[in-house]
Amino acid sequence: MTATVLDGKSLSLQMEAELAVRIQALKAKLSGKSPVLATILVGDDPASATYVKMKGDACERIGMASRKVILPESTTTAELLQEIDQLNADPLVHGILLQHPVPKQIDERICFDRIDIKKDVDGVTTLGFGKMAMSEPAYGSSTPAGIMHLLRHHGIAIEGKHVVVIGRSPILGKPIAMMMLNANATVTHCHSRTRGLAELVGLADIVVAALNQPEFVKGAWIKEGAVVVDAGYHPGRIGDVELAAVIDRCSAYTPVPGGVGPMTIATLMAQTIEAAEKYA
């Protein structure tokens, strides 16, 4: 069986080209100004700094403005909320991204939920999640929304399929399960402590691995012909799935890197532009 490579890198470049055209049209409605994505980085975590830089680089490639807010490791919840309030009130800012994780002394959920839902382009607020789960208009969490776009782009059928999601984070596992359910899939939602996990994964037409543990999902668990979506990334360029053991048996898979990751950033850009279009 020759598996389809769900190439997020190529699709993200195609999306960027389309978004650049939309930005040029938007400038005429924004007095010549570009849409603005504000990114908040608290502390000096190297991985977080890299992710923020990647998002800034993506903004630059498509002609969108990026405003970086960098706060010290000692920032309090109250101080972070004040920064978010300022961005909420700024009419020049169309999207707000608070980079996860924040230092331990900060109440991350309160800070996420302070973001104006009209600017919640990363889909992190409780209100945004609730609206999405109820099939109401809202910006979906960037990674799961990107996964859904990637599957649809490649013609992967979702309706009526059995999807097994492994992972329950509020910005990946939980929203992708709801998105799949809204797309008329039958969803089994699992996590690292689920009993009989291997047997459940073996029943899946589509497996979404999103638990942030390197090669936790073994290739032998996945049935022949299944679609494998690996949302993990770890040193050594490996994901959450033992992919080498299943490439010859699955029907489609996301490479690591180059699968889910580029779609996350492209989706964030797309949702920021959509927010700017609504504002304009």
Image: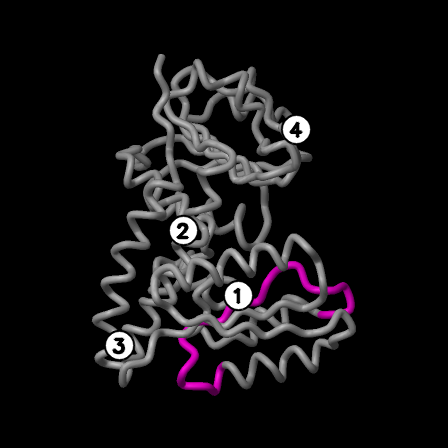
Amino acid bearing label 1: Thr
Separation of disc 2 and disc 4 at Cα? Answer: 28 Å
Secondary structure type for disc 4: loop
Depth-wise, is mark 3 or mark 2 nearer the camera? 3
Choose between 193 and 36: the one closer to the eye. Answer: 36
Q: Which residue position holds label 4?
A: 195
Tell me which numbered mark, 2 or 1, is placed earlier along the sequence.
1
Image quarter in which the C terminus is found: bottom left
Q: Is residue 22 above or below residue 91?
A: above
The residue type indicated by label 2 comes to Ala
Question: In which image quadrant can residue 45 be found?
Answer: bottom right
Q: Nearer the viewer, residue 105 or 254?
A: 254
The one of 193 and 145 positioned closer to us in this rendering? 145
Q: Which residue is mark 2?
A: 145
Q: Counting residues from the N terminus, which is met first, the one under dot 2 or under dot 4?
A: 2
Over which residues does the magenta segment extend?
A: 88-106
| Nearest to N terminus: mark 3 or mark 1 | 3
In this figure, which residue is indicated by the disc labeled 3? 27
For the residue carrying disc 1, how many other residues have a C-alpha within 10 Å: few (<14), some (14-19), or many (20+)? some
Based on the displayed image, in which of its 4 quarters is residue 84 positioned? Answer: bottom right
Q: Position of residue 179 (x, y in %)?
A: 40, 48
Lateral position of residue 18 relative to residue 222, left or right: left
Residue name at image x 68 percent, y 64 percent: 102
Q: Earlier in the sequence, mark 3 or mark 2?
A: 3
Where is residue 127? Give x, y as percent: 48, 68
Q: Label 4 to label 3, Cα distance in Å?
A: 53 Å
